[in-house]
């Protein structure tokens, strides 16, 4: 059993109330002063949502709160109440939060720039290191952008305060100074950064720089700030304790269980003294609810409410009369500042020079009009999609007699440059499993320029580097590149004999591009390369391609999906036109054009999807390296990889993906199962056409280390295939 100090008896509370009430002389004609009631709210991640239930019970039973202090999640709830929000307003705010997105380590996919979406697709594990002064991980898995915007919204009416006593309810929150190793009570200054600091869980959220200190979650040393409530002047301290019984030995079966138990023991130890300084303790029984069950907002609130109700016999002695309650609410309302703002200016902090100027221009459209908080927060989140910044928060500031917005920018501390790493295991052909180690080095500048270098080693070996330079306010770009590759491609000759095509090429290229918006990109390019391909088991007269390729191209991509790996909604379009002026195996120029359209529609606990794609060489006879190919996973999966080749093709796919498991951050694990039908055809000059169909079943496990895919397809003529992939979607 966890240790508990003895609860104070109802008779003692009554005595204390009478004693304090009698300290005011009746002959002064004043009503007796009531005792000041202080509330201390413990930290505990999602468990802290139970605090809202306690506040609702206090509100219903007319129990005033004169001082409030909190740690971590308790700091967020306490800060919201101190800002003047009612318990019902807090409940509504937290119920409307998309906790999966809020706790996600990466910006929403739709907020990423086009190039960062390419990173997300090419390296779905999200494993990224900084290379500023050497390889380094970020200081936190989650920079805290979405939850920081919640803090900004709550704190907007209150610019830097001389004291948090100026709030509608005096407030203190607690953080841990990582450089001095001590607990720090935050009682003044920026309320937004104070809330961010008290919730900066070490290793998960990025620590917060404030007043020259590096601050992290206060729960490390002081998870229940009863001492601070006493210091603020409370006569009666009510503590809301979130400790839960420790797990039995038989339940400690995983790394997460052991780490969670270790954290609980550490917090239990530092709370013992805090509990002894409480006059009353409310302890919600949270049952099977866990630290990361943020989506269970209503369940947590109910447990908190029920816990307060279980102490009604004692707590109701703290209630005031209806007149006193109205007076208490009126005093809070009179100190609450309006959130409405028409910003006269935008000021940028954290960066300077041209970078600050560009950001100021980016947000200039919000100046001089009533602030649309949702639109402004979306614009801030979109700014993090460039990959340069950890977070952008905002608060009200005054300058030259007007009120404006200070946008506080936090750049990533470990880069640029950045390094993405991945491992790809492709089991499309069980007799020829391919393994490749991939890496990407990206150096970027604040103006939008970047150099991206890719290296792949293993079954496929390649190196490529592109310099991307944007101009005309980022609408246009030019991108020269150089590349060399040595690839091994499964290939069927005669429709049944599996062989291997060894392809080597190296060349240069340049693209001139236009970006109408963050979802789309249009490129006109020219590539010139030296090309060699040898097909094993085939006479060199027909199986070797040697020479130069000159290829002007036009490519358009629209990416309106809501995710790179397993989207649930949106549309994506990829269209490409090639005009081969020269290619080995062809004596005359030829053109090809192809298009692919994907559509995802949410339905139930999953999504319906449809994919249509096709291509044509406009009747020309093209050499094998430029032919279209069908066969293999997600491309007539019952058949061999690249089993069918031709000069024109089409493929239609439709199916349903069901979310079997969707764990919220920080676990961020998702399991999907699905079924899909494929129907396709391919035609080749001089050899006619074929049509094939198949039915597939598959599963996709999304993990922080990348996807794991297993599929099984059944096709015509008794064809069937079992395949898998790790770190890639084939």
Image (cartoon, rainbow, N blue to C red):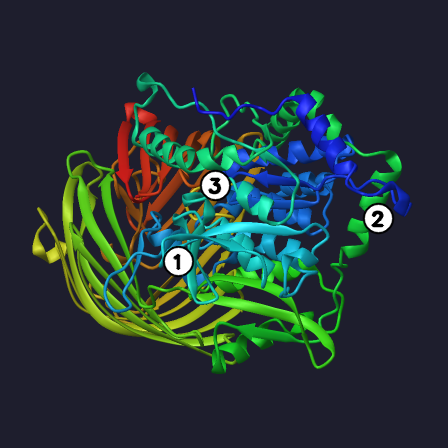
Element type where label 3 sits in the image: loop
Q: Is residue 599 visible?
A: no
Drawn side of residue 306 relative to residue 339, left or right: left
Q: Is residue 216 visible?
A: yes
**Other-residue count near label 3 (Cα within 10 Å), few / some / many at <14 / 14–19 / ≥20:** many
Element type where label 1 sits in the image: helix
Q: Which residue is at the front of the view, 332 or 274?
A: 274
| Labels 3 and 1: the sequence-earlier one | 1
Marks 2 and 3, Cα distance to the nearest angstrom? 32 Å
**Of circles 1 and 2, which is in front?**
2
Residue 328, image x and y in percent? Answer: 81, 44
Residue at image point 34% right, 20% down? 251
**Other-residue count near label 1 (Cα within 10 Å), few / some / many at <14 / 14–19 / ≥20:** few
Residue at image point 59% right, 61% down? 188
Residue at image point 22% right, 38% down? 495
**Other-residue count near label 2 (Cα within 10 Å), few / some / many at <14 / 14–19 / ≥20:** few
- Is the residue 198 above or below the residue 35 in the image? below
- Assess whether mark 1 and mark 3 are in contact (beta carbons under 8 angstroms): no
Total residue callouts: 3
Task: Give the numbered dot on residue 118.
Answer: 1
Task: Give the numbered dot on residue 223.
Answer: 3
State the quadrant of the N terminus: top left
Q: Which residue is at the front of the view, 658 or 596?
A: 658
The residue labelled by disc 2 is 330
Quarter residue 413 falls in: bottom left
């Amino acid at each position: 059993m966890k240790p508990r100090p003895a609860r104070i008896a109802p008779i003692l509370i009554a005595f204390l109330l009478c004693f304090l009430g009698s300290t005011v002389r009746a002959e002064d004609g004043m009503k007796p002063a009531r005792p000041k009631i202080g509330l201390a709210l413990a930290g505990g991640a999602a468990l802290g949502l139970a605090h809202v239930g306690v506040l609702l019970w206090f509100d219903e039973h007319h129990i005033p709160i004169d001082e409030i202090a909190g740690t971590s999640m308790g700091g967020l709830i306490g800060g919201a109440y101190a800002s003047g929000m009612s318990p019902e307003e807090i409940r509504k705010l937290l119920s409307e939060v998309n906790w999966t997105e809020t706790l996600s380590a990466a910006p929403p996919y739709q907020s990423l720039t086009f190039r960062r979406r390419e990173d997300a697709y090419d390296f779905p594990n999200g494993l990224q290191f900084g290379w500023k002064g050497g390889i380094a991980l970020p200081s936190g898995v989650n920079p805290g952008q979405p939850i920081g915007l919640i803090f900004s919204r709550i704190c907007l009416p209150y610019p830097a305060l001389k004291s948090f006593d100026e709030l509608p309810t005096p407030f203190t929150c607690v953080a841990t100074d990582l450089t001095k190793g001590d607990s720090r009570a935050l009682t003044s200054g920026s309320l937004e950064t104070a809330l961010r600091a008290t919730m900066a869980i070490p290793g998960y959220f990025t620590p917060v720089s404030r007043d020259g200190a590096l601050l992290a979650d206060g729960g490390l040393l002081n998870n229940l700030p009863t001492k601070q409530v006493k210091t603020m002047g409370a006569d009666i301290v009510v503590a809301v304790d979130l400790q839960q019984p420790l797990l039995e030995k038989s339940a400690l079966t995983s790394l997460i269980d052991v780490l969670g138990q270790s954290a609980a023991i550490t917090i239990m130890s530092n709370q013992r003294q805090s509990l002894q300084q409480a006059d009353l303790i409310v302890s919600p029984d949270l049952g099977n609810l866990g630290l990361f069950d943020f989506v269970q907002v209503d369940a947590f609130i109910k447990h908190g409410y029920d816990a307060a109700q279980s102490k009604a016999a004692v707590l109701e002695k703290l209630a005031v009369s209806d007149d006193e309650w109205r007076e208490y609410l009126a005093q809070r309302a009179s100190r609450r500042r309006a959130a409405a703002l028409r910003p006269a200016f935008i000021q940028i902090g954290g960066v300077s020079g041209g970078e600050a100027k560009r950001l100021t221009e980016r947000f200039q459209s919000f100046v001089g009009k009533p602030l649309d908080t949702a639109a402004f927060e979306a614009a801030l989140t979109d700014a993090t999609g460039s990959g340069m910044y950890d977070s952008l928060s905002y608060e009200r500031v005054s300058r030259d007699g007007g009120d404006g917005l200070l946008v506080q920018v936090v750049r990533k501390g470990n880069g640029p440059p950045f390094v993405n790493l991945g491992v790809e295991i492709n089991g499309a052909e069980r007799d020829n499993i391919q393994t490749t180690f991939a890496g990407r080095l990206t150096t970027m500048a604040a103006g939008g320029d970047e150099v991206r270098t890719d290296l792949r080693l293993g079954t496929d070996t390649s190196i490529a580097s592109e310099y991307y330079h944007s101009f005309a306010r980022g609408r246009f770009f030019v991108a020269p590149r150089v590349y060399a590759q040595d690839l091994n491609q499964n290939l069927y000759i005669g429709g049944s004999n599996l062989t291997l095509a060894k392809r080597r090429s190296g060349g240069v290229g340049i693209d001139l591009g236009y970006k109408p918006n963050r979802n789309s990109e249009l490129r006109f390019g020219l590539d010139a390369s030296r090309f060699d391909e040898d097909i094993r088991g085939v006479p060199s007269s027909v199986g070797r391609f040697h020479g130069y390729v000159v290829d002007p191209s036009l490519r358009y991509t629209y990416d309106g999906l809501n995710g790179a790996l397993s989207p649930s909604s949106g549309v994506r379009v990829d269209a490409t036109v090639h005009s081969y002026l020269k290619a080995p195996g062809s004596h005359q120029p030829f053109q090809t054009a192809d298009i692919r359209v994907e559509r995802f529609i949410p339905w139930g606990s999953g999504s319906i999807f449809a994919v249509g794609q096709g291509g044509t060489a406009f009747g020309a006879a093209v050499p094998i390296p430029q032919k279209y190919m069908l066969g293999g996973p997600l491309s007539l999966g019952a058949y061999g990889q690249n089993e069918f080749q031709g000069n024109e093709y089409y493929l239609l796919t439709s199916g349903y993906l069901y979310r079997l498991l969707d764990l919220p951050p920080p676990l961020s694990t998702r399991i999907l199962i699905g079924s899909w039908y494929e129907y396709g055809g391919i035609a080749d000059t001089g050899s006619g056409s074929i049509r094939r169909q198949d039915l597939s079943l598959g599963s996709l496990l999304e993990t922080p280390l990348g996807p794991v895919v297993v599929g099984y397809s059944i096709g015509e003529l008794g064809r069937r295939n079992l395949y898998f992939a790790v770190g890639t979607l084939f």
